[in-house]
Structures are given as C-alpha cells and as structure tokens.
Image (cartoon, rainbow, N blue to C red):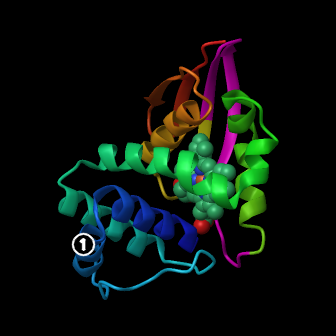
Amino acid sequence: MKGAIVDCLQALVSNKFGKDKWGKALEMGGYDPKKMFLVTEDVEDAKVLRLVDSVCKVLNISLTQAADAFGEYWVCEYAPKIYKAYYQAAPSAKDFLLKMDEVHRLTTINIPNAQPPRFKYEWLDNRTMVMKYESKRGLIDFLVGLVKGVGKHYKENLLVSKVGNASVKVVFAK
Ligand code: HEM
C-alpha cells in the first residue's frame, strides 16, 4: 500500500498520543523505532496491517476504534494538505464520496502494481446510498471510519453503517 497511509498513521499516533507510542508500535512491528516512511514508497500490505495491529496493542484500542481514528485523521487532517484539489472540487460529503472511485484510480495511476480500492454506488432512495467496496484487502472497518471522517470534514450529519463485508450504507441529512 502507498507509504502515505503509513505516514498518516505515524502522524496520527505521534501527534495525538505521543512520539514514544509510535516508536513502540514500530518496534513491536519489527522496525527501528526511528524508521520513516516515504509517502511515495510502496509498503507491503501485510506490514501495514501488522503496524495497525501494533498501534492497537500499544494504545490499547480495538481495530474498529483504530479504523475510526484513522478515517477521521486521514480525511480531516492529512489528505486535505496533500490532496487539496479533490476537496475543492467537491462542495458536499455526497459529491466527495461520489468522486472516491475516480480519486483512487487517479492517485495510484503512477504506482506500479497498485491495486486501489474501487467503489460502486447504488441509491436506495434520494438520501440513502450504498457504497460497494471492491478490494482484495477487505478493510471494511476502515471504509466505515473514512466515510464517517467525510461527514466530520463537511460538518454533515451522516448515518454510516456496515452492510456485510463489502458495502457501507450512508444516509445523508439532506
Ligand atoms: C482525497 C482523499 C483520498 C485520497 C487521495 C485517497 C487515496 C488513497 C490511496 C493512495 C490509498 C492506497 C491505495 C494503494 O496503495 O493501493 C488509499 C487506500 C484506501 N482508501 Fe483512500 N483516499 C482518500 C479518501 C478515502 C475515502 C473518503 C475513503 C472511503 C470512503 C477511502 C477508502 C480507502 C480504503 C478502504 C483504502 C484501503 C485500501 C483497500 O481497501 O484496498 N479513501 N486511499
């Protein structure tokens, strides 16, 4: 997975819980506690997941809590600095979510062997959308956390729930 994901995890843990906690998580994951990740490098999926697991242990939180914290940090703090244009192009949470399939295709287009998640959208009524997630990684809890983060960023009250292991239902307030 793209190094930006690990760099974001690093920033989240270091800024919100302390640099020492991130150092501990790195050590637990088999790394030097001072290891840095480049946003552009490719980090093996298994290594990313091992680091997430180490973070859960060091902070004593569940995977769902980690996924919610990561989703909010990525969407509200990390991505706006690096990928500002995508936010400027989307005036609402709905517009932003509907762009996510294209955004993932575009941000990974220059990465050899990248396998970005893809999304399909289905409307149950004019306020209720099901976002179908296609990825071999099965990170559905992260998808839920990220969608909740989008609601926070746009200050919209979204009702977000998991539907099985490959879809998320989103009810928009308007
Ligand atoms: C501007 C905002 C965003 C950008 C630029 C972005 C970009 C990326 C990139 C580069 C990856 C790594 C992909 C790879 O290495 O193969 C990734 C992973 C992922 N993104 Fe985003 N993302 C954004 C927001 C979101 C949002 C809002 C969601 C959910 C609605 C989302 C869902 C995911 C998921 C679930 C993954 C994990 C990879 C997988 O499941 O296969 N992302 N994203």
Q: Which residue is mark 1?
A: 20
Instruction: Mark 1 and ligand 1: say if the CB distance to the nearest ligand atom is below 8 Å.
Output: no
| Residue 166 on image: x %, y % | 51, 40
Residue density around tag 1, few if under 14, some if 14–19, many if 20 or more, within 10 Å: few
Residue at (71% x, 66% y) in the render: 108
Which contiguous range is marked in magenta? 111-131
| Residue 48 on image: x %, y % | 42, 70
In what quadrant does ligand 1 lie? bottom right
- Front one among 14 and 169: 14
Q: Is residue 131 visible?
A: yes
Quadrant of the image containing the C terminus: top right
Residue at (78% x, 60% y) in the render: 106
Note whether 62 is above or below 21 in the view shown. Answer: above
Left or right, 22 with respect to 40, comes to: left
Left or right, 126 with respect to 42, comes to: right
The image quadrant of residue 59 is: bottom left
Residue found farthest to the bottom: 32
